Image (cartoon, rainbow, N blue to C red):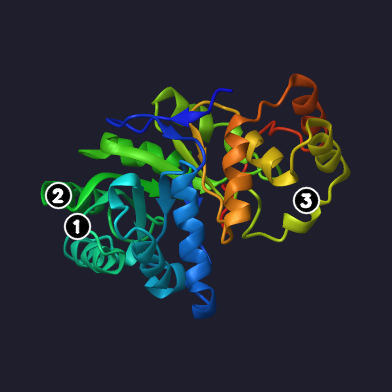
Amino acid sequence: MVTKSVIFPGEMPLPAIGQGTWFMGDDPGLRQQEVGALQAGLEQGLRVIDTAEMYADGAAEEVVGEALRGRRDRAFLVSKVYPWNASEVDAVEACERSLRRLQTDRLDLYLLHWRGNIPLEETIRAMELLQQQGKIRHWGVSNFDVDDLEELWQEPGGTGCATNQVLYHLASRGIEYDLLPDCQQRQIPIMAYSPLAQAGRLRQSLFSHPRVVESAQQLNISVAQLLLAWAIRRDGVMAIPKASSVAHVRDNAAALEVTLHDDVLMALNQAFPPPQHKHTLDVV
């Protein structure tokens, strides 16, 4: 079986499924379970771990830091900065706080969590400074639509953006109309957050949808595996689902080797049609 991968600029191929941490760190009683799940994910080869200073007010980064003790070199570590911390001075301080919580001296990828009021040119300078200081290896953005990216790319240094992390799942396909093709043309990977609709109100209806359930049964896989395999079916897309149990992590990892045949894709397209016009970027 072929395991799908994604290549960030200047990197070796990384598995097209990583590990998200949104909602981790909220309940101290689940901390060891969450740590164990992240470590199990690394054992399964899910090297990309995505977190943010926003998640549980930094507690998610602390969970990741504990999980990576003695394992830091096995992970491709991603965190995100608040837009109001994205100035030249504040971004450095925010990054240093994240590094302390993560118990590491560097991030592999640092993202602007969403666009705010600080000029993009200043945020780019901040990211380049962090690179020069060795605190981050790459930088990118999150929740940027086509117009935002076009503006970013026009700024000095803007083409150094390594990725765009956006909402993407079977019931939210708007990026396929313009954003995804644009990023593919520029060879900028898309990181799909909430690929199982974890953060939205659609999860229950998506997991119980007759066409989704039927397609999963047809392939003898779980619904989660079907949805993840769907999300990464295109080149240059990585999914970062959150899994706070070892069983869920193993289920997610197995989706890397799932191939969706044309008849399955056609059935899913009938139930959830691809976009025929521009959609406002979905954000949760």
Please determine whether, in this image, residue 204 is positioned above or below residue 42. Answer: below
Helix, strand or loop at mark 3: helix
Q: What residue is shown with label 1?
A: 105
Helix, strand or loop at mark 2: loop
Q: Nearer the viewer, residue 31 or 177?
A: 31
On residue 207, the disc is 3
Q: Farthest residue in the left direction?
A: 133
On residue 135, the disc is none
Amino acid type, callout 2: Gly
Please determine whether, in this image, residue 182 is positioned above or below residue 70. Answer: above
Amino acid type, callout 1: Asp
Residue 154 in sight: no
Q: Determine the residue positioned at 46% across, 41% down.
A: 45
Residue 140 location (% of width, % of height): 34, 45
Q: Nearer the viewer, residue 244 or 96?
A: 244
Q: Quadrant of the C terminus?
A: bottom right
Residue 51 location (% of width, % of height): 41, 58
In three-dimensional space, the C-alpha distance between marks 3 and 2, rounded to whole angstroms, equals 43 Å
Mark 3 or 1, closer to the camera: 1
Q: Quadrant of residue 82?
A: bottom left
